[in-house]
Image: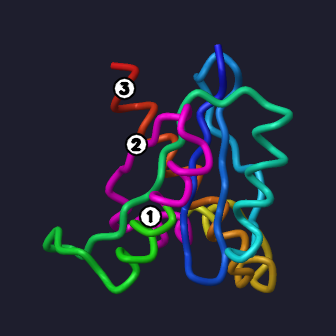
Amino acid sequence: MARILAIDYGLKRVGIAVTDKLQLIATSLTTVETTGLLSFLEDYLRNEEVEKVVIGYPVDLSGNETDATPAVKKFIKLFQNKFPDIHIVTIDERLTSRMASRVIIESGLKKMKRREKELVDKVSATIILQSYLEIHNR
């Protein structure tokens, strides 16, 4: 089996998570500057078999698109043009950053480490991927 990759797309940074080859466990992979995302993905996809990419889709609490939604849509189009053989799935990412912050606080990390935005982005991507796995492995 191939891996599933998850992307928590942001205007500055992107959190990335990935499954194991059996698609059972979501693990945070890295955080990448948004400007370097396509280059990172080219390198990663050259070395790892990925069958699907799950992208967090930003909506507000009412389910309406947010200011970040157009950037995510634009990235999805770029990704589809660059990697047409990889299936893309979007998943509602409402509250993932809050959930990630809570997970980080509960993990017992020191206050300075908890303030790192990159950590929140990686954990958010992992939550997005874990949510996808839970929905589709029932």
Question: Is residue 97 rendered to the left or right of residue 64?
Answer: right
Helix, strand or loop at label 1? It is helix
Residue 94 position within the rendered picture, expressed as x and y whole percent measured from the top left: 33, 66
Residue 23 position within the rendered picture, expressed as x and y whole percent measured from the top left: 59, 23
Question: Crowding at label 3, few (<14), some or many (≥20) Cα neighbours within 10 Å?
Answer: few
Q: Which residue is mark 2?
A: 89
Residue at left offset 59%, top offset 33%: 4
Q: Considering only order in the chain, which callout, 3 or 1, is on the residue closer to the N terminus?
A: 1
Q: Which residue is mark 3?
A: 136
Most extreme residue toward the front is 81
68 above or below 130? Answer: below
Q: Quadrant of residue 58?
A: bottom left
Question: Is residue 118 rendered to the left or right of residue 25?
Answer: right
Helix, strand or loop at label 2? It is strand
Q: Amino acid at mark 2?
A: Val
Colouring chosen for the image of the structure: rainbow
